[in-house]
Image (cartoon, helix red, strand yellow):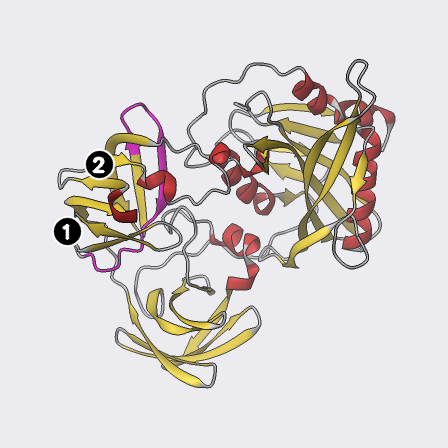
Amino acid sequence: MKKVFLFFLVLPVFHFLSAQPANPAANPSANPLGNGALTHVGHFIFRAPEGWKTNQQGNLFTMIAPDAAPDELLSFLLLDPATDTGFQSVADATLSQLAVALNGEVIPQVSVGHPLYFEMYSGRCLKGWDYSWGNGRIRIKVMKGNDPYPSWIEFTVGLFLARLNGRIERVCYLSKDYKCGVLQTTTSFKWTYERVIDDFFFNLRFDDWTDANVRPGRFNNAGVTGVWSGVAFFEGAYRAVTFILYDNGQACYNTTWPRPGLANLNTIVAAGNDPPHWGTWTFQGGSGVMKISYQTIPFSIQGEKMTASMNNSTREFKRMPILDEVRLNGSWSMYGGAISISFTADGHFEDAGVFRELQHRPTTCNDVVPEKGRGTYEIHNHSIFLHYSDGFATQMAIAELGLQKGVCSPDQLVMGWDNNSLTKK
């Protein structure tokens, strides 16, 4: 990297070391990448996330997350492309370059061979280019005063690599690690930023690449499309699972839901971030085939029933209705009443700890959802939209199991991406 690149690469670290006071946490946007003008840097075409501070010098473009606490930092960097086309070698070299630029060192992985880069996912994006998505870690030695022993500032580095037209395009984020009680976490785990990270990479375009003619999927329960629910042998045990078949030919097979539910879900992005549970389907003359990750699943449909052949057995699934006219009425609790939530038929809620618990964050430092609150709610397409009286707003998954159009008050209310069951009070 050129010297001018190195200077602007360390700007985020200077920003962190200055420890400027944090602003109150911003609401997550329904569109975290904003609706601003497209930015063109190198071959990249993208929209900067709403509210993020941007800086460009030459071919290097940096974006710093807003509303970071004094011990937090999250910065995106769009780097110049690599001519090497091997993901592991490019990733290792990139981590080494970043470490040198920050006057630090890369922390090798604990896996066999101790590589610098740990690849979480790789494959072919539905836009047509191959990608690798993973992380590494960098630490910077800090000497304080007369203390003879060093302390360390550590960063998690997320790396996204896209291979196209004989080169590898490189995007990364630099996420400050910090202590939360006795646990260590990192800024990128903060819920406010998680959606931006999930959405940014697979929304990238390139000026010399024409994306495959694929649009995000939708379903309207016509023909094959819809959410099909049943029980199957999944990851070592019989579990409640769903097949979600979209009108663009995508399929999702899992026991859980995307965190925000299915409303307004960009299925191309969702598949890129979770390839083991996504695939494709084809269907003709009453029967079809799903190809999900490592398995091929023949299936047939008669009316509202799907029959799928999997794991040397035949399983039946029923299509879930589309419920966009649901109101809840009553109070439900978890953990023997330790936390609870109340809904009214006129569209109001009062929460005492349930919504935060349903996020299942690794530490309380990553929480943004209020511990308690009240406001109004709506339910659409397996998502519940929450509008708090103080202006905070979010959405999360709701399975809609046991619900029906109109006012509902089931004995068990299933909510959250992990299908947590709440008991009627």
Residue annotated with mark 2: 349
Q: Amino acid at mark 2?
A: Phe
Magenta extent: 387-403
- The image shows residue 134, relative to residue 13, as above or below, that is below
Is residue 166 visible in this depiction of the protein? no
Is residue 263 found left or right of 59 in the rendered image? left
Q: Residue at x 79, y 52 (%)?
A: 115
Task: State the CA–CA distance, disc 1 to disc 2.
Answer: 14 Å
* Image location of residue 304, percent across then percent down: 26, 73
* Image location of residue 394, percent across then percent down: 37, 36
Is residue 162 found left or right of 242 in the rendered image? right
Is residue 338 found left or right of 410 in the rendered image? right
Query: Are discs 1 and 2 less than 8 Å apart at CB?
Result: no
Q: Residues within 10 Å of mark 1 (few under 14, many from 20)?
A: some
Q: Secondary structure at mark 2?
A: strand
Q: Based on the picture, tell me whether residue 356 belongs to the magenta stretch.
A: no
Q: Residues within 10 Å of mark 2 (few under 14, many from 20)?
A: many
Residue annotated with mark 1: 409
Is residue 313 visible in this depiction of the protein? yes
Q: Secondary structure at mark 1?
A: loop
